[in-house]
Amino acid sequence: MTFRESILIAPLLVATTLAGSALAQDATASTSAPTEAAATAPSPAEGYMSRYIPQNNLFEVGIFGGLFFPAKNHELGDPTQPLAPYAKVAPELGLRLAFFPLSFAGLEAEGAVMPTHTKRDDAKAGLWAVRGHVVAQLPLASIVPFVVVGGGALGTSSDTLGTDNDPAFHFGAGVKMPVDDFVSVRLDLRDTLAQKGNAKNGAQTHFPEALLGLTFTLDRSHPPPPPPPAPPDSDGDGIVDSADQCPTQAGPVPAGCPPPPDSDGDGVLDADDRCPTLAGPAPEGCPPPPDADKDGVPDPDDACPDVPGPAPKGCPLDPDNDGIEGDADQCPDQPETRNGFQDTDGCPDDLPEEVKQFTGVIPGIEFDFAKATIRPVSHQVLDGAAKILTDYPDLKVEISGHTDNVGQHDTNVKLSGARADSVKAYLVSKGIDAGRIQTRGVGPDEPLADNKTKANRQKNRRIEFKILTE
């Protein structure tokens, strides 16, 4: 066995010995008399291998020492000076901080120094490393194997080589062996890769490491001990037998005895219930008189016992179900026609002929080409529409503008909306309330005919009126 192999294996032997000592200490503690401290510590019955299994959201801090094996053909140094190898082995000291959001994975940062000297002139030299890595571990037992992969910087400060640092990549494996909730022994075997000396960029050389340290785990928790067994409660009513006056019959606190009988379950005890077999409200416990239509008016007082309605007569306020109730409904036996004309009197009706002339497509409304400007030839038609809206002040109308499919779709939609707005503005200028008019720009999306011919395209370019209902 070579000297380097002996050095690499020695930390593993030490760690194994420490783990064996921890196991032996656990076995001894399990047979010793309990103490006050043992009451808050994890139960020895857990066993060593299950007592310190990794958990989520743990922080770890640590110190470590070990051996660092500098590469012979490194590139750490002043590029104007000839490279000089370091001593074959350097001691290593460092600190680490880790966070494990998951029991099997975490992030760790380390800083380390490696005091040494150069072989050629025995001049003092110091190596250092700053690095971070991902830690993946196996959280199945207290003794936890793990691997690390990461990167950082490897640097030097040397009388001979000057000051320099290179990017470094590292990987390795190891094991953590807890001594108690707080302290664990940790062994790492690593290899750090950095730029190889006198080689093209990207060529790597090796800096092996063997590290042994102590890790301090913060806020490790253990499940609470099981609660003591509950005192007996034979009838399961939540009152223990020692305080239950009826331990074999379930009942409420404080006595634990069942309540007096209430055969119909109406909350009135049989002793006070005039109808003990028929559920009814207090104080007599009898059901209310019949109410066939369920309107809250008893049948003897209900003038319409088969049709629900409000008190006192129990008859509906809107017998024709047109939404207009009571005196406001001038035709209570005939439903209102919802057509936008006299929709609040409760009577059926038809739109007057003069109003029908201004529904649907309105011919005779023309605009300048590609504009929303109304041509004077359209004024007579629009004045007629204004007169109808003036004569029938309850009417509300929607004005929609339509185009053919020539040109860009969005432009046509915008143009059709602007033309509908122009018609609205004209009607408002004639004294029509703007709140009675809605507008809509449809563009080419609702054609009356296909747009394959000039005549059809002319037909599709139009203004439509629609009478709005409430």
Image (cartoon, rainbow, N blue to C red):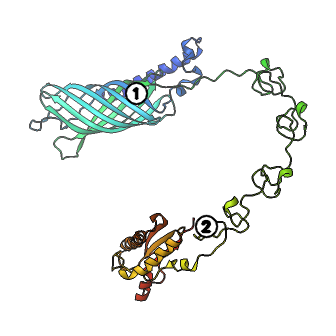
Residue 171 picture location, percent across and down: 34, 38
15 left or right, relative to 196 = right
Q: Residue furthest left?
A: 80
The quadrant in which the N terminus is found is: top left
Q: Residue at x 35, y 72 (%)?
A: 411
The CA distance from mark 2 to mark 1 is: 78 Å
Q: Residue at x 52, y 72 (%)?
A: 391
Q: Which mark is residue 60?
A: 1
Label 1 neighbour load within 10 Å: few <14, some 14-19, many 20+: some
Q: Nearer the viewer, residue 172 or 339?
A: 339
- Name which quarter of the figure residue 456 lies in: bottom left
Number of numbered callouts drawn: 2
Residue 85 picture location, percent across and down: 17, 32
Name which residue type carries label 1.
Glu
The quadrant in which the C terminus is found is: bottom right
What kind of element bears circle 1?
Answer: strand
Q: Residue at x 80, y 27 (%)?
A: 251
Earlier along the polypeptide chain: callout 2 or callout 1? 1
Residue 435 picture location, percent across and down: 47, 63
263 left or right, relative to 350 = right
21 over 149 or under it: above or below: above
Residue 272 picture location, percent across and down: 89, 31
Evaluate whether residue 365 shows in this view: no
Name which residue type carries label 2.
Asp
Q: Nearer the viewer, residue 94 or 354?
A: 354
Q: Are marks 2 and 1 in contact (CB under 8 Å)?
A: no
Q: Which mark is residue 173?
A: none
Evaluate whether residue 418 shows in this view: yes
Q: Which residue is mark 2?
A: 343
- Name which quarter of the figure residue 28 lies in: top right
